[in-house]
Amino acid sequence: MSHYVELSNLTKIYDTPKGPAVIVRDFNLTIAKGEFVTLIGHSGCGKSTVLSMLAGLNPISGGGIVLAGRELVGPGPDRGMVFQSPSLLPWLTAYENVMLGVDQVFYTADPEERRDIAEYYLTVVGLGDAMHKKPGELSQGMRQRVGIARAFALKPKMLLLDEPFGMLDSLTRYELQAVLLELWRKNQMTALMVTHDVDEALYLSDRVVCMTNGPEAEVGEIVSVHFPRPRDRKAVMEHPDYYPLRERLIEFLEVHAHRGLSRGEAGGPPGHPGNGSPRPSPKAELLLNPA
Amino acid sequence: MKDSKFKKLDWLILPILGVGAVLILWQVVSASVSKELPNPGKTWAASKAYVVEPFAKRGEMDQGILRFTWYSLVLVAKGYALALLIGTPLGFCLGLSKTFAKTFDPIIQILRPVSPLAWLPLGLVLFLGAGKQASELGALFTIAVCAMWPTVLNTAVGVRAVPQDYLNVARVLKLSRTKTLFKVLIPATLPYMFTGFRLSLGIAWLVIVAAEMLTGRPGVGGFLWQEYNALVYEHIILCIITIGIVGFVLDRLMSVIERRFKTA
């Protein structure tokens, strides 16, 4: 069962007016069943692109993805997705938001069973008293709890998390990381998470995959994280390997920030020929050419 | 003390002052520039019977003002319903399909500014075969065709503005097309749709008056035109005021409904 998920030579190319822009090239990664893997990298390096291809929300330009022995085509509820913004439908209550998916996936179960599933997961994430409120009445953190409950309630083969805690304050973030970890452990779920928070990656995952800077991002380095489970934040942070690992990840990120720069100066990536700076953002371009 | 008391009542006092100013201006104009224009007092005296007994029916074209209003409202309701029934699905198609939008957008942009006065004769021609019903059907056609555009365009904008996140949720859950439409697209578009509905109702009310004038149907607009021909100018003013008040009330009602959907 060591190849539960297999991403092979995954490539994403966007056609732009200036020619094809290669975002991700030959991305290879295998994930074992029940493993928690984190993708880290700088903003815009293409890590979310990898995740959304895995989710089936973004068409694949090259390579392939195999999940549980079957090639993936398009999106589906077998991959539970937790988005950066919770993406709840604001006209439905927390409960109804979860039920939307539960009704869809467990359509053979009788209504009572379905209700129990939704209520169970909402209670587990700590929303037992607030499940009949609308997202507008919930705090940002509570909304993300609903998002997590929605993903787990569908009993997916795999969990995909796209910077799920990026918009939360650090206290709420810690709380929700613990909630997520507990649910993941209980459900034996295979998970892939995108983040740029090194501490979050170390606390949650079995392996941390560092992505090189885009364009043409690929797997740079894979770091195994072997802190004993179930994990306790304090124990993890006091582990003798914690700071060396943290150092290593941060160093990787820093080196790649500079590598991106020098590569840009050496002629520019394809699709951005000639101009000396590394992939200027549209804003920077505006500043350069005021006309 | 006095000042604050005035501030509290200014919502009442200021509008009264405004109305008073317009009445004085009206009086002055009718006394100086335009001698044919009946002054406020004369207008009231001539209109009293229609206002005091708003539901009286003395003859086909001699009825209480609210009775006339009622006829007009019934016709507007029919035409408006037709406009929404055609306009909403059309808006959804425009919003959902780029091909559809590219195909029909130019023709919509051309038809949209056409005046109700131009549509009405076409409506009458369309239903020539209907005999006695021709004028009603023609009026309905005109109301529908003029009033639907805000609904069409706002719905289309609303559909295009549905956040990608919501659509992703639908895609991840593999909701069927109908389920996506009813569970995601329509609820997400409702606030835009209701803005369109409100604007459409305003136009429908504008069109009814023109339609009644040209077809001579009993109603506020028909009454207005008849009284112009009968040289009873006081009643023209009565009709204008009635049309204005009804339009205002309709708009208020719709915006109350609209607000309920915005907060949801």
Image (cartoon, coloured by chain):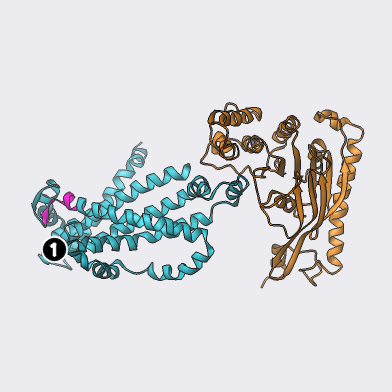
Chain colours: A orange, B cyan
Whole-percent x, y for residue A187 in the image: 72, 32
Is B165 above or below relative to B31? above
The answer to which of A205 and B36 lies nearer the viewer is: A205
The residue under the point 24% across, 57% down is B22
Residue B211 makes an appearance in the image: yes
Res B124 → quadrant: bottom left
Quadrant housing the N terminus of chain B: top left
Per the image, label 1 sits on a secondary structure element best described as: helix
Res B210 → quadrant: bottom left
For label 1, count other residues whose C-alpha is less than 10 Å away and answer few (under 14), some (14-19) or many (20+).
many
The answer to which of A77 and A126 lies nearer the viewer is: A77
Whole-percent x, y for residue B220 in the image: 19, 57
The residue under the point 66% across, 52% down is A74
Chain name for mark 1: B
Judged left or right of residue B28, residue A85 is right
- Seen from this angle, which residue lies furthest left? B58
Whole-percent x, y for residue A33 in the image: 79, 39
The residue under the point 79% across, 68% down is A270
Judged left or right of residue B107, residue B168 is right
B65 magenta-colored: yes
Judged left or right of residue A30, residue B81 is left
A185 magenta-colored: no
Res A262 → quadrant: bottom right
Is A101 above or below relative to A251? above
The residue type indicated by label 1 comes to Gln
Across the whole image, how many numbered discs are drawn on residues? 1
Q: Which residue is mark 1?
A: B226
Whole-percent x, y for residue A188 in the image: 75, 33
The residue segment tinted magenta is: B61-68
